[in-house]
Amino acid sequence: MIQTISRCSVKRTYRQFCTSEVCWKKSNVPVSKIINGRLSAIETRKRTKKQVKEFQEVAGRAPGLAVILVGDRPDSAAYVMSKTKTCAKLGMPSFQYNFPETVRETELLSTLDYLNHAPNIDGILVQLPLPKQLDEDRIIQYVTPSKDVDGLSLTNVGALTHYGDAVLKACTPAGCVQLLDSALDGELSGKHAVVLGRSDIVGKPMASLLLARHCTVTTCHSRTKNLQQHLKMADIVVAALGKPEFVKGEWLKPGCIVIDVGINKVPVSADVDPLSKKVDDWKLVGDCDFESCGAVASRITPVPGGVGPMTIAMLLQNTVNSAWARYKKSTEEAAEPDALLR
Ligand code: NDP
């Protein structure tokens, strides 16, 4: 999707542009620089909704998503709620499985067994992080690859690394690529991209996707030396460190594009009680210092309102992709019963 911004809006600041929902602080970053993830997510959801209807017409049911939530982390519960709400808006049934913090691994695995075989479930999402006593990797890898809408199974990771594409790609990096396409009009080839972070869910798949789009990719992590030197050479910066406002504008190459994946909850002022539960005492910030990075970069994603909305949109798109892929496979097998024996 190409984001168009009218000439008259260029002078407006992001503060004037955004709604209270999106705006997290006063900012002088011009609206022309903002990569608006909410708008891109709306476009993506519209497309997905159409595909849900098409699938329903052909298969006689809508694609279904199952979400597993363990424990009572408020952030995880909020993410899950937002995912199930979006499902409802798109006409997709979602099924939530809640477990207490103390759940045994065998219980989770038997639920996954059921979901792996359930014909009405096309996507299975295990909300991370899981409590420490559970073997997170074992649980993630237990999800059958054809329903792994988080794109974390070795099959999907392998396809992404080997072919540069997979039916089910990690949602956040896939959303970031869509935002980059909108900012660069699809011209990613030859750009030097620096990815900060090497997690399985963001950093590594992000690097694979950028490489597949012919970027020159540098992945940085906590042991990287001379981080600022790497950043100075970057046409594209994708920050996924989980460190509030870590990246400063003066570290960046003028005119670069900044995709800020980070979501960090920080107090609005130094005198906020760290245990405060008052909503007004907290704000969300990214891994980049928005003000200084926004002054140097040519385009930047805000937090919130940047990458976050795209992640959910891509999750639902993955569920539809999974539904189609599974449907096609089952009709092919039905048409050619001997195929299973070969
Ligand atoms: P992880 O904690 O799994 O990974 C953080 C990465 O940052 C690690 O690879 C770590 O390196 C690296 N890192 C830490 N400190 C530094 C440093 N000083 N310099 C360079 N690299 C460093 O985090 P995630 O990838 O899961 O998430 C990152 C951020 O993105 C978080 O704020 C998270 O909330 C957010 N997020 C947002 C999503 C969205 O939808 N917008 C979705 C997922 C995550 P090392 O490997 O060496 O430890």
Image (spheres, grey):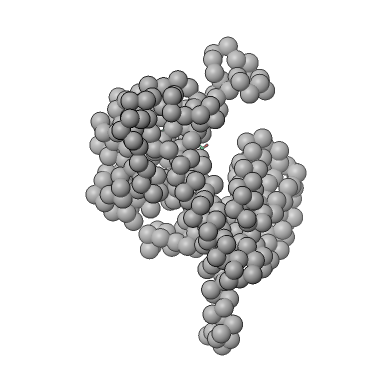
Is 69 in front, or is 223?
Answer: 69
For the point 44% across and 32% down, which residue is it? 302
| Identity of the residue drawn at 47% across and 62% down | 167
Percent across and percent down for residue 246 are 42, 27
Of the pair 267 and 91, the residue shown nearer to us: 91
Q: Quadrant of residue 231?
A: top left
Left or right: residue 30 versus residue 330 is: left
Whether residue 323 sits left or right of residue 192 in the image: it is right
Percent x, y of residue 89: 61, 49
Residue in the picture at 74% in, 47% down = 99
Q: Residue furthest front?
A: 8
Q: Residue furthest top?
A: 271
Total numbered labels: 0
Query: Residue at (59%, 82%) from the top-left corner?
Result: 334
User: Which is nearer the eye, 294 or 30?
Assistant: 30
Is residue 113 at all visible to an observer of this figure? no
Instruction: Look at the picture and state if 271 lies above or below 57.
Output: above
Q: Position of residue 342 (x, y in %)?
A: 53, 85
Q: Position of residue 187 (x, y in %)?
A: 27, 49
Does residue 80 appear to the left or right of 209 in the view shown? right
Above or below residue 124? Residue 262 is: above
- 248 sits left or right of 169 in the view: left
Give the answer, above or below, for where 306 lies relative to 96.
above
Nearest the camera: 237 or 198?
A: 237
Name which quarter of the figure residue 55 lies in: bottom right
| Whether residue 111 can be seen here | yes
Q: Residue furthest bottom?
A: 338
